[in-house]
Image: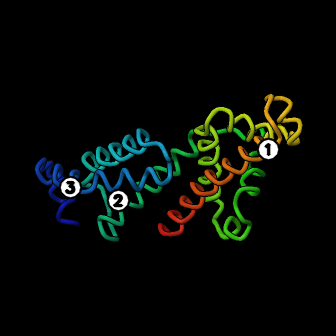
């Protein structure tokens, strides 16, 4: 058994606090790479440390302690993403394919595609309101540029500019996410 885990199983608070302080911030950053939600990331990491404190004597670590921690974080993040059950009423998966080159997207596992999909839903919701409206009308309701312009009282060029900016922002964030997912495999 790992020495640190052995001490934690004996309820050594000093070792646990040192262990927590050493790993907490980096694990929150890692979790946030999956969730893009700092509060949820912090909650998951705290739950993991509570679990370790309460179950240290039952842990069977076959790899390094750090590897074990990262695997726990990844699994908990994936479970969290599954638990929020964002519905796809507007078939946003098609939207993903328009935003990411097929080569990159097809080289990603189904589990990672699900993560990307959920992140795109979150990213669209963080866009400025006007940009969100344009994106949703185009990709969710399949409006033409002229219909969007008419609906929102803006020019067709503004519609095109808003879509271009939205695509750029979403692609940048999704590409970063895909890179993180590839690094973690």
Tell me the SS state at disc 2.
helix
Residue at image location 83% in from the left, 35% down from the top? 149
Question: Which image quarter: residue 106?
Answer: bottom right
Rendering coords of residue 118 (x, y %): 62, 47
Of the image marks 3 and 2, the number of the one nearer the N terminus: 3
Rendering coords of residue 63 (x, y %): 34, 71
- Cα separation between marks 3 and 1: 55 Å
Tell me the SS state at disc 1.
helix
How crowded is the residue under tag 2: few (<14 C-alpha within 10 Å), some, or many (20+)?
some
How crowded is the residue under tag 1: few (<14 C-alpha within 10 Å), some, or many (20+)?
few
Residue at image location 75% in from the left, 50% down from the top? 95
Q: Which residue is mark 1?
A: 157
Q: Which residue is mark 2?
A: 69
Q: Which residue is mark 3?
A: 19
- Left or right for 45, reference 182: left
- Left or right for 79, reference 66: right
Tell me the SS state at disc 3.
helix
Of the image marks 1 and 2, the number of the one nearer the N terminus: 2
Question: Which image quarter: residue 6?
Answer: bottom left
Residue at image location 52% in from the left, 51% down from the top? 78
Depth check, front residue: 153 or 92: 153
- Cα separation between marks 1 and 2: 49 Å
Which image quarter holds the N terminus?
bottom left
Q: Are marks 3 and 2 in contact (CB under 8 Å)?
A: no
Of the image marks 3 and 1, the number of the one nearer the N terminus: 3
């Amino acid at each position: 058994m790992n020495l640190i885990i052995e001490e934690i199983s004996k309820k050594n608070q000093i070792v646990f606090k040192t262990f927590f302080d050493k790993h907490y911030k980096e694990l929150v950053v890692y979790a946030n790479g999956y969730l893009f939600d700092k509060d949820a990331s912090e909650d998951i990491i705290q739950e993991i440390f509570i679990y370790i404190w309460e179950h240290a004597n039952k842990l069977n670590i076959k790899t390094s302690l750090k590897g074990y921690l990262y695997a726990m974080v990844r699994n908990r993040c994936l479970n969290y993403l599954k638990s929020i059950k964002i519905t796809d009423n507007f078939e946003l998966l098609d939207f993903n394919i328009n935003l990411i080159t097929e080569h990159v997207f097809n080289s990603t596992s189904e589990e990672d595609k699900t993560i990307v999909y959920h992140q795109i839903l979150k990213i669209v919701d963080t866009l400025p309101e006007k940009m969100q409206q344009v994106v949703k009308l185009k990709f969710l309701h399949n409006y033409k540029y002229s219909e969007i312009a008419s609906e929102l009282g803006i020019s067709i060029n503004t519609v095109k500019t808003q879509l271009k900016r939205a695509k750029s922002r979403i692609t940048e964030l999704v590409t970063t996410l895909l890179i993180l997912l590839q690094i973690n495999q």
